[in-house]
Each structure stands twice: as C-alpha cells, then as structure tokens.
Image (spheres, rainbow, N blue to C red):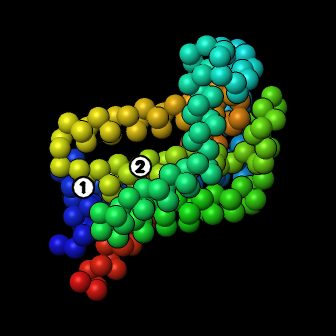
Amino acid sequence: MNIIEKILDFEEFPNKNWHRKAFISSFVILVFILLMEIFKIRSFQNFEKSITGWFSGKYGHPMMTLGEGFLNDMMTIAAKFFDTKPMAIFAVILAIGLIYFKKYLQAFWMVYIVASGGVIGIILKKIVQRPRPLHHLVADDGFSFPSGHALASTLLIWSVIIVILPLIKRGLVKELIRYLLILIWGCILFSRLYFGAHYIGDVIGGVSLAFTWIFLNLLVWVQIFRKIS
C-alpha cells in the first residue's frame, strides 16, 4: 500500500471507496450549480435572492469592522484573516513545517492543491462573470461565482483534515484540531452571506469546486503511485 492509499484509507473513513463517492457527489453538485448560474435559471435565482434577503432582513447591512458586537467581530475576523491571500500564506507555512518534519509529499500537496485550485477558481470567475449581490461591501470586488473565500478555505482546511491530521497520533489533539478547523470553516462560509458578499450558489459552488479538485487529485495520485511503487 503506497502513501496516498494510506492517506485515503485512514481510520476515520472505514468505507474504502469513500473518496470516490465524495468526488462524484461534489462534482454533481458543482455541475448543477454551474448550470444554474450559466443559464440563469429563474427559480434558482429567486431561491438565492430569498436567502440573501433573509440575511439582509436578519442582520441588515453590517460593516466589516471590529467592535460592533460578538457576531460581527467573528464574521469580520473570518472575512479579513481567512481571505484567499492569507490562505495561500497559511498553505506555504504549513508546507514549510511539513518539510521540517520530512513530510515532503504532504508539503507539496498543500501548496499544489491550494495554488492550482485557486487558479481554477479565478478562471471560472472570468468565464461566468457573475455580478455580486446589490448591497455587497466595497472591499468585496471582482466577480461573485465561485466564492474565493469558500474555495480557498475549503481547499486548505479540508486538505489539512484529510491529509495532515492522520499524521497526528494523539486522538484527543486530533479531534480538537478537526472540530476547530470545521468551526473556522463554517464561520468563513457564513461570513460571505452575512456581509452580502455572495449568493448562496456562489458559496456552494466554491465549496463543491474545492472538494471536486481535492478528491479528483487524490484519485489520480493513487493511480500514479501505484505505477511507480
């Protein structure tokens, strides 16, 4: 069994084919959302606008500043410090740490998956060219689909959960880190809707694109390492 297969079969996922099913599921969701956006399906757009309207009615039009209450502070931190550029920096820092511990494959994986997935997201934004919601913050410029925050955070955080956490032997530490990462990830996704930066489809599109790219690469890497090992 090569190193990629060991990663794919770690104890948290007893189903041997979980990664294949995860790829298929995320790809189907991505294609569905993409078709809804490209062909501007009215019923789906109305659904998105209703979600955006609910957030606007519930939270108004919050500003990305600290000192405006606990929730707004949490969302501001999630939006500012977990943007695409900080995520890229985190990936490089993690890679350096992995290289220090001689985990070269995992180090390459972190940089490769975040960088390449980010490039795909940029290309997709330019192809779809979806405008952002009407009352989005000035700081949130560029096109809306897919959400860069959702894409980058999913690429980084779930790569850590799937590829790096299995390296940690202490079960309690592993669980605490996993739940903390998932909490941070959830806050990042919520912040995109809270600040009106994206429609719900943009966020789902970013997440599904990230998962599709992660699991596609895991599947491909398994085949590569089977041939060379």
**Residue 172, percent from left and from top:** 20, 36
Where is mark 1, residue-wise?
167
Drawn side of residue 86 relative to residue 125, left or right: left
**Residue 47, percent from left and from top:** 66, 30
Residue 116 appears in the figure: yes
Where is mark 2, residue-wise?
158
Name the secondary structure under disc 1: helix
Name the secondary structure under disc 2: helix
For the C terminus, give its image quadrant.
bottom left
- The mark nearer the N terminus, 2 or 1, is 2
Tell me the residue at 29%/63% (across/down).
Answer: 101
In the displayed orientation, state which residue is furthest to the front.
100
Tell me the residue at 43%/32% (across/down).
Answer: 183
Drawn side of residue 144 relative to residue 34, left or right: right
Which label is found at residue 213? none
Amino acid type indicated by mark 2: Trp
Residue 106 appears in the figure: no
In this rendering, the answer to whether 229 lies above or below 27 is: below
Count of number-bearing discs = 2
Give the quadrant of residue 117.
Answer: bottom right
For the N terminus, give its image quadrant.
bottom left
Amino acid type indicated by mark 1: Leu
Circle 2 crowding by C-alpha within 10 Å: few under 14, some 14–19, many from 20: many
Tell me the residue at 49%/47% (across/down).
Answer: 154
Give the quadrant of residue 17.
Answer: bottom left
- Nearer-the-camera pick, 24 or 151: 151
In the displayed orientation, state which residue is furthest to the bottom.
228
- Nearer-the-camera pick, 130 or 178: 178
**Residue 211, percent from left and from top:** 46, 53
Distance from the alpha carbon under mark 2 to that under mark 1: 14 Å
Q: Nearer the viewer, mark 2 or mark 1?
A: 1
